[in-house]
Image (cartoon, rainbow, N blue to C red):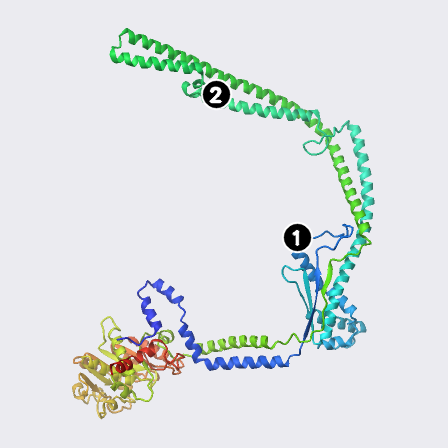
Amino acid sequence: MRTAISSRSEALRTDRLLPDDEADDVESFNIDLGWIFAILRRNLLLIAAVVVAALVLGLVVTMLMTPRYTAASSVQVEQQADRVLGTEDVQPVASIQETARFLQTQTDLLTSRAMADRVARRLNLYRDTDFLEAMDASPADPVAGATPADVQRQRRNAVLGQIAENLSVRLPNNSRIIEIAFTSPASDVAAGVANAFAEEFITSNLSRRYNSSAYAREFLSQQLAEAKQRLEQSERKLNSYARQANLIDTGAPNAEGNGGTSVTTSSLVQLNQAANQARAQRILAEEKWRSASTAPALSIPEVVSNSAVQQLLARRAEISARLSDERARHLEGHPNVQQLAAQRDDITRELDTLSSGIRRSIRDAYESARRQEEALQAQVRDFSAARLAEQDRSVEYRILQREADTNRSLYDGLLQRFREVSAAAGVSTNNISIVDAAEPPANPSSPRLMLNLALALLVGLAAAGLAVFIREQFDDSVRLPDDLPVKLGVTPLGVTPNLKDVSPAEALADPRSSLTEAYSALRIALQYSTSQGLPQTLLVTSSQAGEGKSTTSYAIAVGMAKVGLRVLLVDVDLRRPIMHRLFGMANESGLTSLLTGQSEVEAQIRHTNVDGLDFLSSGPISPNPTDLLGTGRLAEAVAAMRQGYDLIVFDGPPVLGLADAPILAGLLDATMLVVEANRKRHGAGKNSLRRLRAVHANILGALLTKFDPGKAGLNANYGYYAEYYQYGSRAGNDAG
């Protein structure tokens, strides 16, 4: 039989099969779309109201806005103007890498305050009283005692502020065409200001180029005269020092790129090269000698490659072979053996003598290379000293020569640039041109109704989401079984549907009704609620009256009796007892009779029409129920009841406002809380659980009653709940 639990509860039980850390990871990354949909569904009216209000507000604001027109002109900007002489640009041309920076600079020039001032003067906007009115703006009233200059300055700032506020300059990517747009309530004003910006941009660019060229000519003329005088003085100083120091330039540049190369310098270079070669040869000879001095003679390459050594080795190998043959046939004292051994020894001595000679030749080569290196190093030191002396005499000469060369280069460059600037002075070129002139627009650019409505929709959705979030945060009603562990911290034991057009007693009488199936699932959940199985004494209570605890107690007792258990149902609600009505019995005596000592347990227990189920009513209503339950007779009565029954179900009073339920919960084996779905609780559930835990009650979990998927924000046929509730009906129909 399937139990009425939610998909999230199933996921929680699945996580228990995993390690704790993995289960936490699965839960933390789980997005329950059904839960989100349920929240949206039950708050649909709130969301719709907020969104509609935002759309209406956006529409009203749009209708109240003043229409504004935007006119745009465009100009093309090149990095350099067309050249006539080839030397028109006084300022250096930006490189390809500087293109973006160059174009951004032009854009900044267009939006500068100086450009706005040129446009205002061109259109006479400072004195035009209609401009600010056309822009729906006016300067602030002048303060008392303000001078005409102050008033004029205030008006000037107002005009420039309106121009800057309504000007838009856009440079598309990978383009040299700049779009200049101006927005105004008057279409002709928008077009006039946009065209004025384009024209003034070109005019100001030409003016900057002309002023730069005139300044450059004047500056170059002054610098050229000063450079010529410095060049003459430096060349006279150079020639005078050369005569005094007897220094003659041979014309060939030295290693430093200046002056001439002397004989001493040339000899020193050649000696350095020879010394380096001698050092390399000495190192090679030294390595050979070190290897030959310690290695065996026959492992030295020069010995092994010697032809005489090779011949002797071959002869010795031949005689050794013959000696081996003779020794195999004769004794060691045989003449042939002795003769061959003597020949082999002679060859060995010759090899040693020859190897020693080769080794001495290697040593002699090393000594010769070392002496040659030392001789060349001595010559290098002598020539180095001579070269240093020569350098001391050339220091001042080189200083004067560099000064003269620098002055000559500066003079030549200034002279060339002066000629270019003078030639280009009369040529007017511009790198900016108008592509499109602005025309008065026929249609306003703002307000844009669809855009404003779209923005209003986004704002409305965001506000609706915030409202739903706040509402859900402050709503502590339990809507789904999933809410029980989240909002109350208890385990969901089951869920019962909300009945329509039928009473709970009628629904429980039908074995295939959704209510019966739900309580059957609860019975199974209770049997596995503890490690010892079904508790013997069970208190069924709720936070408030009317949540279905009495129906639940009755259903549990009847269901357990039908599966063969001996069950006793006790009505311990001494203030508003109703359980006797479900059995059609009188309530003249009962539990209160036991607690007051007027009767024994066996005398008050009554049999019902359900096999295995007995009933103990509450008895007459007592004026002090709490005092009765607090006596020791209740514990004695419970102990007596335990002797004859497998399960004793206590239909208890509500928890809030009464001390009865906590007294019973502390005495009995287990407690189950009944929670009505969708009831505004205002903290009642948490307070009830807090009171029960204060007496160390064993709380098995909670049953969610009167569950309605529609009120919870779920589809009427949503998920497992509806499938479960309709299971019995479908089975009956199929069977029929």
Residue tagged by mark 1? 96
Compared to 536, does 271 lie above or below?
above
Q: What residue sits 22% from the left and 71% below the top? A: 532
Q: Mark 1: which amino acid?
A: Ile
Q: Earlier in the sequence, mark 1 or mark 2?
A: 1
User: Residue 227: in sight, yes or no?
Assistant: yes
Element class at badge 1: helix
Which image quadrant is residue 481 in? bottom left
The picture places residue 366, in percent across and down from the top left corner, at 52, 19
Q: What residue sits 57% from the left and 23% below the top? A: 278
Q: What residue sits 24% from the left and 70% below the top? A: 531
User: Residue 142: in sight, yes or no?
Assistant: no
Q: Mark 2: which amino acid?
A: Trp
Compared to 54, does 501 lie above or below?
below
Left or right: residue 498 compared with residue 139: left
Left or right: residue 286 compared with residue 618: right
Compared to 324, does 593 lie above or below?
below
Element class at badge 2: helix
Residue 289 image label:
2
The picture places residue 630, in percent across and down from the top left corner, at 26, 83
Which image quadrant is residue 621 in? bottom left
The picture places residue 567, in percent across and down from the top left corner, at 20, 82
Which image quadrant is residue 588 in? bottom left
Q: Along the line of sight, which residue is nearer the eye, 527 or 405?
A: 405
